[in-house]
Image (cartoon, grey):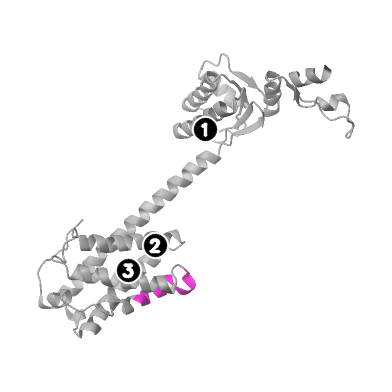
Amino acid sequence: MTPYHSRHLTERLRQLFGGRFDGLAQHLEEPARVHFGGGNNLLDEEEIGDLSLELQHLIAAQFGSADPFSCDSPEHEALQSFFINLARRVLARGGEIESLVRYTQTVQHKLIAGMEQINEIDFTRSRSVLAFVSTLFTELLLSIFRAYLGQKESTIQAQEEELRETSTPITEIWKGVLTLPIIGTLDSNRTLVVMDSLLNRIAQQHTQVVVMDLTGAGSVDSLVAHHLIQMVRAVQLMGAEAVLTGIRPEIARSLTHLELDLGGVRTRASLADGLKDAFRHIGVEVVPLRGGARHGREDRYRGRGRDERADDER
């Protein structure tokens, strides 16, 4: 951390560092109430009182430390942690970074005014006092911004992770049959997330067929095609069949121009055709309803496997 610019002790700085602090919390409550209380609904009155009293003790410890100018002292680290934790709490409750900045700036002015009133010393006329307090609060503001940026980055990463998880839903259409609609572009990170989730589902549910639908996929270049083939091969290594559906003419041309080895890859024109193929593979026949409420043997067989139908015949 950057050290304060000057360690020269003027008479006013000596008086500031050796001053009384009892009652300072009352001066510090107003900024918290204005920016966090009332209609802002970020802190209640009890929290504001506790917050201001804690800040009074931390400021007294900073000013009364062996080296008030040090940014590495335990007292300064404690004061810095106070503002970092306050920023996290306010931001987590829906507060804005502007409120934290304005609060900190107001605290800076209330601190000097409060110390003047408590100690009956005119600190605002001392350049050394103003420079010291200004530099101190600049460091604290930087801590707030670091906390804000860190929390924002974590939020963005969590949102991106959630988006990757939800943008490609894996659905069990039938026992043993999964569908994987691929929407947008497959990059390396997304391929790894989708593949990991897909392979785990195959292992957990003993999947026999995975229908991968490309109807919503973006353009296919060599990298995207490579990721696609990787997923197909991984499914096959797990002992399941992979069926590609929804291959548009432009995707077909791209795959042809790339001269990829698509041997053993089953393709169908549409998702419906792919599902029919998957059902045939697992021995399921889907029969359309005839006559609405008829309950004949043909209706009992609807959507049932060969073994179940054979049992009924016997």
**Mark 2 Cα-neighbour bin, 10 Å: few <14, some 14–19, many ≥20:** some
Of all residues, the one furthest to the bottom in this rendering is: 120
Give the alpha-carbon distance from disc 1 to disc 3, as whole Å.
46 Å
Is residue 100 something that shows in the picture? Answer: yes
The residue that disc 1 covers is: 197
Lateral position of residue 67 relative to residue 271, left or right:
left
Q: Earlier in the sequence, mark 3 or mark 2?
A: 2
For marks 1 and 3, the one nearer the N-term is 3
User: Residue at coordinates 50% horizontally, 19% vertically from top-left?
Assistant: 258
Q: Magenta segment range? A: 29-41
Which quadrant is the C terminus positioned in?
top right
| Amino acid at circle 3 | Thr
Q: Secondary structure at mark 2?
A: helix
Percent position of residue 141, x then y: 30, 63
Of the numbered discs in the image, which one, if any, rests on residue 104? 3
> Is residue 34 a member of the stretch shown in magenta?
yes
